[in-house]
Amino acid sequence: MKRTFAALLATVGTAGLLAGAALAQEGEPIVIGIPVGLSGANSVVAPSVVQSAELAVEQINAQGGVLGRPLELKIADDASGAAGAQAAFDSLVFDSKVDAIITMEVSSARNAGLPIVEEGNVPYIYSSFYEGRSCSPNLFVNGWVPEQQVPPVVDQFMAAGAKKFFLVGSDYAFGRGMLEFTRKYVAEKGGEVVGEEYLPLESSDWTAIISNLRASGAEALISSTSGGAPNVTLIKQLRAAGVDLPYGNLAVDEGTAATLGADSAGIIISASYVTGIDSAENKTFLEAMQAKFGADLRTPNDLSVPQYEAIWLYKAAVEKAGSTETAAVLAALPEVSFTGPRGTIAMSKQHHAPMTMYLGEIQADGSVKVVSSFKDVDPGEQCPDL
């Protein structure tokens, strides 16, 4: 079941919007829980994720909702960590009895929440890029994994002559998982990792690591820090220290880059979404976001756009299933797709999604110049037993 965002909107006029909204109010709400880091490390990017979710729900309800029922969001702060996630998931699943969890979170929060999702038996769409291989019958992922994201960055640097790499990460599942894959890929391509260091997620002083980087003889730097505050502190301190090595950042999103401005200039990223994607669906999405949020709009990015698309994918699955019953929705999710800002997304490969990836260079104003693109990159073997 393929849903095309631009085509759907084009068929709905003002009268249709009003009629659809009225229709959507006839049934009991379908409640989507969003545990997200409104505080802590992810607080830099969480507002953009919430905005994307709000737009998706508004558009869907304007068209009549899902099976004649309105969608409703219930948002809980997971404090960007495991303890906060346990409380947020428990409240959403067992107290609020949400019909589904759809969210972007740090990996420690996802790992803490997943057993609660399984116990409560609700569908869970994880909309964040992550380190890969998180597997559960209840879990689907529409963000990228290392197999899709890392090779373009390493290949770009090696093509320019870099052979010695220094790796820097936040000390948690995402940081270590991404750099484990990077280390292996560098070795496979004939390069050498001359240093690999981590900083606790809650820390912000990168001085000692930057000193070791300087002394390592590295020819390129690749970092995998938590999205949000750790990215900001690392980038600012690298620039203040005058580090000018070719730099690939595996976690900086376009919204964070925009807040950093010139400090992020020249950083190489690999992403499934950039605002410059030239498609009717992306243009329509950006116009709708601007119209809804105006001056309060947070830059749509590689963490917020998958959240938007995940809600549309959930809608498609419920409609295919003809029910919000968990088993039926889980069976439908790998069989549906949605064509939106990133193109057509289907979580059809072991609960993960093949997707087009973009290699980009951040400009002085925080925008991203696309260097090259790679269509329908396979996520590889993620959950072969599902």
Image (spheres, rainbow, N blue to C red):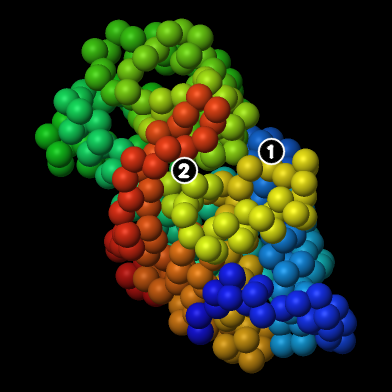
- Tell me where residue 361 sits by quadrant: top left
Mark 1 vs 2, N-terminal side: 1
- Tell me where residue 99 sits by quadrant: bottom right
Q: How far apart are marks 1 and 2 (CA)?
A: 19 Å
Q: Is mark 1 on a helix, strand or loop?
A: helix
247 vs 216, nearest the viewer: 247
Please state which amino acid type lies under the numbered disc 2: Ala
Please state which amino acid type lies under the numbered disc 1: Ser
Looking at the figure, which quarter contains the C terminus? bottom left
121 vs 104, nearest the viewer: 104
Residue 285, given in percent of the width and then of the height, sits at 62, 59
Residue 245, given in percent of the width and then of the height, sits at 33, 18
Residue at the (63%, 43%) spot, across then down: 299
Against 103, is 5 above or below? below
Against 118, is 231 above or below? above
Residue at the (27%, 44%) spot, across then down: 151
**Pair 1/2: label in front:** 1
Residue 282, given in percent of the width and then of the height, sits at 55, 58
Residue at the (54%, 39%) spot, across then down: 254
Q: Would residue 369 appear left or right of 340 to someone viewing this image?
A: left
Residue at the (41%, 28%) spot, across then down: 267
15 vs 351, nearest the viewer: 15
Q: Name the residue under label 2.
A: 173
Q: Residue furthest bottom?
A: 322
Q: Would residue 265 appear left or right of 79 to someone viewing this image?
A: left
- Tell me where residue 20 sits by quadrant: bottom right
Q: Mark 1 points at which residue?
A: 43
Q: Can residue 247 be seen in this view?
A: yes
Count of numbered tags: 2
Q: Residues within 10 Å of mark 2 (few under 14, many from 20)?
A: some
